[in-house]
């Protein structure tokens, strides 16, 4: 029954088709390169559908994101799209928020409400972010044709508020001036949500950078990948040491596909206008949200599930 | 009089059984399986066990491959606020084998009630379970069967058992190809061959089968479980190097600065 196209995964405890897993990695890597998201919110459910246990799927995905985001960060770094200063501040906030989020989810698991919170957070966050990005990008595309970044140019109440915050700092790579508190606090909030949802948080971080930190879209993508790289290094080591759920063989297969996909994605992303990029990401987020909502509303085929899955 | 330890008594019983088998007529029932150890290496994608044996002539055969029973803890999906399906209460099933594969020479129902008891549906009816939220109880055994069948770890198939012509001593040889799934966990299993004649069980034989990790999967599994932190650092380092390597290949091709 064994064939050269199949590989046995010792931690997942199952065999997979090498071509199918590599192709899956390639598609998600392409999206990662284009949009600057780790792809965890897409990859993990797809791996579960292939028969990988949920805990192993999520942890191994973090491992492959390390490789894919290294490749993607390098590609964006060469194009001058990584704001290292901003990325490091977001990372500090993200690590602190992630640690707090892990404690919150541990407490909720003890109380028995974790699954409910995780599912509802997923649908709300995906719906909110996807819906807002979609509408905003659509309006922006209609409104002005001269800017390819699509940031609002009017001095809003929010802009005045962030301008008054203390410890203002220049971020030359992004061409903005902001309080240090902004990336720290927002990074922390994304970290909490990412820990609750069990993902890298790229799909939350990208809209936060675009709409709340007002960074140009192409710098957002590179900086997001830079920050995700460090987050996933931490998650991979923690998951391996504490839960033994990282399947390196699975991660390596996904990585081969995703690293190549990320490189192609970085080139494709550079050619797409900012608004179109945002509307595509918004559509993707909304499709995933729709699928998750459907799963919540329609009676499942089997009314039992293994512990640890969402 | 000193009592023999349990292990000694089991050994004595085994030797006694073997001696009785040896003293049995030439046409006595027997069972063999190849391989006796399923090696789970890097290329493993399930395996086929070659089963052969002898049963009384004109009998039907049921083959059953199962693992050691253990308690299984699962989450039950329930509707929250009458709208959303969520994993909620915990259900504990008692003495459930991780794998249970049944293959029979013809429909179990046609062999009589004794054989029908070996069917998964009949087996599941006897499964005991506890629900920590009894108000929302579901048909646990049926759902468990659905879950396990969906994973390919429980299976019931008909046919695929070939019989040779009966011999003069009233015995009949049989052989079968018995596939075991890719998701088979390393451990000890038991293959049973049960023969039924005229609606009653006439022979029951069993042989142990072992599944074990070999080669790269064995090495990775032992590293991951015994030295988790080192495994994590290695996995991260290899991913980083692979990402950098692929990044550099693309840099060279695109001729970027």
Image (cartoon, helix red, strand yellow):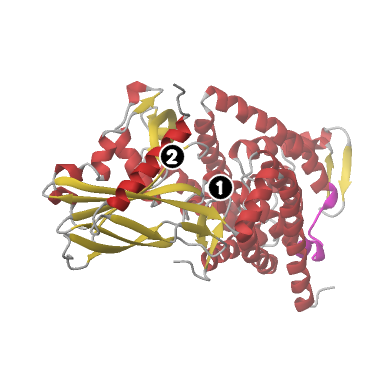
> Which mark's residue is nearer the viewer, 2 or 1?
2
The local crowd at label 2, few if under 14, some if 14 to 19, many if 20 or more residues have their Cα within 10 Å, is few
Residue A68, given in percent of the width and then of the height, sits at 69, 59
Chain under callout 2: B
Residue identified by numbered label 1:
A130
Residue found at x 43% / y 39%: B11
From the viewer's side, name the closer residue of A34 and A226.
A226
Whether pointer 2 and pointer 1 mark residues with C-beta atoms closer than 8 Å, the reply is no
Residue found at x 70% / y 30%: A100
- Image quadrant assignment for residue A191: top right
Residue found at x 36% / y 58%: B32
Residue A84, given in percent of the width and then of the height, sits at 84, 52
Disc 2, SS: helix
- Image quadrant assignment for residue B215: bottom right
Residue A82 belongs to magenta span: yes
Q: Is residue B163 visible?
A: yes
Q: Is residue A160 visible?
A: no
Q: Give the range drawn in magenta.
A: A74-85
Quadrant holding the N terminus of chain B:
top left
Residue identified by numbered label 2:
B11
Quadrant holding the C terminus of chain B:
bottom right
Residue B218 vs A165, above or below: the answer is: below
Q: How far apart are marks 2 and 1 (CA)?
A: 68 Å
In the visual, does B204 lie left or right of A227? left
From the viewer's side, name the closer residue of A120 and B185.
B185
From the viewer's side, name the closer residue of A207 and B114.
B114
Residue A298 vs B1, above or below: the answer is: below
Q: Do labels 2 and 1 share a chain?
A: no
């Amino acid at each position: 029954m064994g064939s050269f196209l199949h590989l046995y995964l010792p931690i997942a405890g199952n065999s997979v088709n090498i071509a199918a897993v590599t192709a899956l990695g390639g598609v998600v890597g392409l999206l990662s390169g284009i949009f600057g998201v780790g792809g965890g919110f897409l990859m993990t459910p797809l791996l579960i559908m292939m028969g990988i246990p949920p805990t192993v799927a999520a942890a191994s995905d973090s491992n492959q994101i390390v490789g894919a985001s290294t490749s993607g960060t390098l590609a964006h770094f060469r194009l001058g799209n990584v704001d290292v200063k901003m990325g490091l501040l977001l990372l500090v906030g993200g690590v602190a928020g992630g640690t707090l989020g892990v404690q919150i989810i541990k407490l909720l698991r003890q109380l028995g409400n974790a699954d409910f919170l995780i599912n509802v957070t997923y649908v709300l966050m995906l719906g909110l972010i996807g819906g807002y990005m979609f509408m905003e990008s659509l309006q922006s595309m209609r409104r002005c044709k001269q800017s390819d970044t699509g940031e609002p140019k009017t001095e809003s109440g929010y802009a005045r508020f962030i301008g008054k915050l203390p410890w203002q700092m220049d971020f030359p790579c992004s061409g903005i001036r902001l309080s240090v508190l902004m990336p720290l606090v927002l990074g922390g909030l994304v970290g909490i949500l990412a820990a609750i949802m069990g993902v890298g948080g790229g799909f939350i971080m990208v809209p936060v950078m675009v709409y709340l930190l007002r960074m140009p879209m192409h710098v957002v993508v590179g900086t997001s990948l830079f920050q995700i790289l460090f987050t996933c290094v931490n998650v991979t080591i923690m998951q391996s040491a504490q839960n033994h759920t990282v399947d390196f063989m699975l991660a390596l297969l996904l990585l081969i596909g995703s690293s190549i996909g990320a490189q192609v994605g970085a080139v494709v992303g550079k050619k797409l206008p900012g608004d179109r990029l945002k509307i595509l990401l918004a559509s993707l987020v909304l499709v995933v949200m729709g699928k998750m909502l459907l799963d919540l509303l329609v009676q499942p085929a089997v009314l039992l599930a293994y512990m640890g899955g969402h | 009089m000193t009592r023999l330890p349990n292990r000694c008594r089991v050994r004595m019983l085994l030797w006694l059984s073997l001696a009785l088998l040896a003293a049995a007529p030439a046409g006595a029932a027997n069972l063999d399986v190849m391989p006796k150890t399923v090696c789970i290496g890097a290329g493993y994608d399930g395996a086929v066990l070659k089963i052969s044996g002898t049963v009384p002539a004109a009998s039907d055969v049921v083959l059953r491959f199962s693992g050691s029973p253990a308690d299984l803890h699962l989450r039950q999906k329930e509707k929250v606020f009458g709208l959303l399906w969520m994993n909620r209460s915990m259900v504990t099933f008692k003495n459930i084998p991780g794998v249970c594969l049944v293959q029979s020479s013809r429909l179990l129902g046609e062999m009589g009630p004794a054989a029908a008891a070996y069917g998964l549906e009949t087996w599941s009816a006897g499964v005991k379970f506890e629900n920590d939220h009894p108000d929302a109880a579901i048909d646990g055994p049926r759902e468990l069967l659905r879950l396990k069948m969906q994973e390919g770890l429980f299976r019931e198939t008909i046919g695929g058992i070939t019989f040779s012509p009966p011999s003069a001593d009233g015995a009949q040889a049989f052989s079968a190809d018995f596939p075991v799934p890719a998701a088979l966990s390393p451990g000890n299993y038991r293959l049973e061959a049960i023969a039924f004649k005229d609606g009653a069980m006439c022979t029951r034989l069993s042989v142990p089968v072992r599944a074990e990790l070999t080669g790269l999967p064995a090495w990775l599994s032992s590293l991951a479980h015994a030295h988790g932190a080192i495994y994590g650092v290695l996995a991260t380092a290899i991913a980083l190097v692979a990402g950098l390597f692929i990044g550099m290949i693309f840099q060279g091709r695109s001729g970027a600065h």
